[in-house]
Image: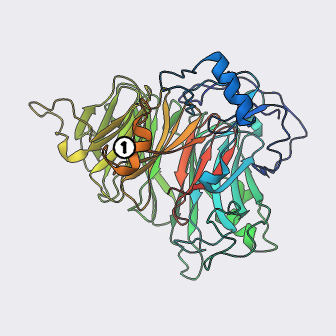
Amino acid sequence: MSKRTADASGAGPLKSGDRPDAMDIDDKTNEMGEFEDEFEDEFESEDEIIEAGVDGRPDAEREAEEAAAGAMDVDNNGPGTFIVGRTKLAPGETLAPDPTTYRMLHSLSTPWPCLSFDVVRDNLGDNRSVFPATMYTVAGTQADSRRPNDNQLMVMKFSGLSKMDGADGDESSDDEDDDEDADPILESKTIPLNSTTNRIRAHQTPSQDPSRPPITLTATMTESTNVLIHDITPHLASFDIPGTVITPQQNEPLYTIKAHKAEGYAVDWSPLHPAGKLLTGDNDGLIYATTRTDGGGFVTNARPFQGHTSSVEDIQWSPVEPTVFASASSDGTVRIWDLRSKSRKSMVTMQISNTDVNVISWSRQTTNLLVSGADDGEVAVWDLRQWQPSGSSAPGKPTPVASFNYHKEQITSVEWHPTDDSIVAVAAGDNTVTLWDLAVELDDEESKDTAGVQDVPPQLLFVHYQNLAKEVHWHPQIPGTLVATGEEFSVFRTISV
């Protein structure tokens, strides 16, 4: 597959039914993805490299040119200020990360790009800080439209994820391995699919045999309108148990949800139903609930939840109420529902945007907070205690606790930090993944450096360039570590989180 380059004319990430242009097809593409050393060939490229606004030339040469051309004004953000996602690159220019701002940074390519992925919890322990790191993920591909049968569900193991040289200011630390320069390794097991994966989510349920690891299920929402539930437990085991063989039967879905008549993008497993309870929403505005039975099968309720007047873009279960969930829609609303409702109508409906609400995330630390991302680039934080029930005499339009319009393109992913209720990760159509600290106040000492840059809020902690950024997730067991997908995957950890 020919790789799309990160240039000024590159298209932004996709949402809903939009698809990329057909890509060149290389029949010799290896099924296995491969890691790329982010810095191995950094200075061998013929393209000009821009690093945090500095183009790598000697200061005297650069300053002389700027003096001759006059002060550079970039989007009214001050002379000479280069802002990722705002400043346009000239033809032939590419962006290179500043290695001093990362504790870990790796990129990997898969045979086809993936619109969605999820991180799978493992048995290697929580709060681990040992390098090289190991993690497991699952993703669904978006093959060329001329090759739909090339689509796959990919179960992946990333290992050998080393930290940046000198990231801690010393050569080693007590809680880290000495082998920090190990080459990263990507291992992959694939399940054939015949359709693009719009969104995929993983769920772990206890095994009936307490001595065995939990069962890992995936729910894959496909472009074909079907939702496929797979058991990927044997695929995960095959990475670490020599001689494990995956049979064709183990690649077959356990269950296929066929209730949807239109494709969808909203799917979430309940964290409070260990056996497995799934919600799926489609472009017709309908939401279906699927429950795993005591015998291990699945049942989909024939009667959907309905009320949205346009597509359901995202769903999030409440982290504390086992029957409550939230949905976001391209009708600009977020609705709160209860499974026990006989009417199948929402309890609360709030018009929070004049554009599509693409994504939401419910805080697991402060459970009255919900963050949303919209088509106009707004990221907003809402206190659900201020929302009035549907039918209230004067519900009014809610006021967000915090709102940021830094991004000028659609928001494609938002996720709260798993243990810090003030930090949020955001992916956007401006080819960036940003980190935000909502606890930072305007008059904080640490905000002074950014206060002078117009339209850059002091709450903005970090900007990571991710071409065609689509989705971002925190790793729940490796503090501060993020995985993001777009044109390729990024695994990174900044020195600021």
Residue sitting farthest toward the left: 393
Residue 313 position within the rendered picture, expressed as x and y whole percent measured from the top left: 45, 34
**Marker count (numbered):** 1
Q: Please indicate, yes or no, whether residue 254 appears anywhere in the rendered image.
A: no
Q: Is residue 141 left or right of residue 42?
A: left
- Dot 1 falls on a residue whose secondary structure is strand
* Identity of the residue drawn at 79% across and 34% down: 3
* Identity of the residue drawn at 60% across and 52% down: 101
Residue 199 position within the rendered picture, expressed as x and y whole percent measured from the top left: 56, 42
* Identity of the residue drawn at 41% across and 34% down: 452
Q: Please indicate, yes or no, whether residue 49 appears anywhere in the rendered image.
A: yes
Residue 348 placement: quadrant: top left
Query: How was the colour assigned to the protein in this rendering?
Result: rainbow
Residue sitting farthest toward the top: 69
Residue sitting farthest toward the bottom: 211
- Mark 1: which amino acid? Val
Is residue 79 positioned above or below 213 on the image? Answer: above
Residue 329 placement: quadrant: top left
Residue 215 placement: quadrant: bottom right
Q: Which of 34 and 66 is in front in this view?
A: 66
Residue 408 position within the rendered picture, expressed as x and y whole percent measured from the top left: 48, 26
Q: Which of 333 and 133 is in front in this view?
A: 133
Is residue 494 positioned above or below 60 on the image? Answer: below
Q: In this view, does 178 lie to the left or right of 28?
A: left
Q: Residues within 10 Å of mark 1 (few under 14, many from 20)?
A: many
Figure quadrant of the N terminus = top right
Residue 144 position within the rendered picture, expressed as x and y whole percent measured from the top left: 75, 30
Q: Name the residue under label 1.
A: 371
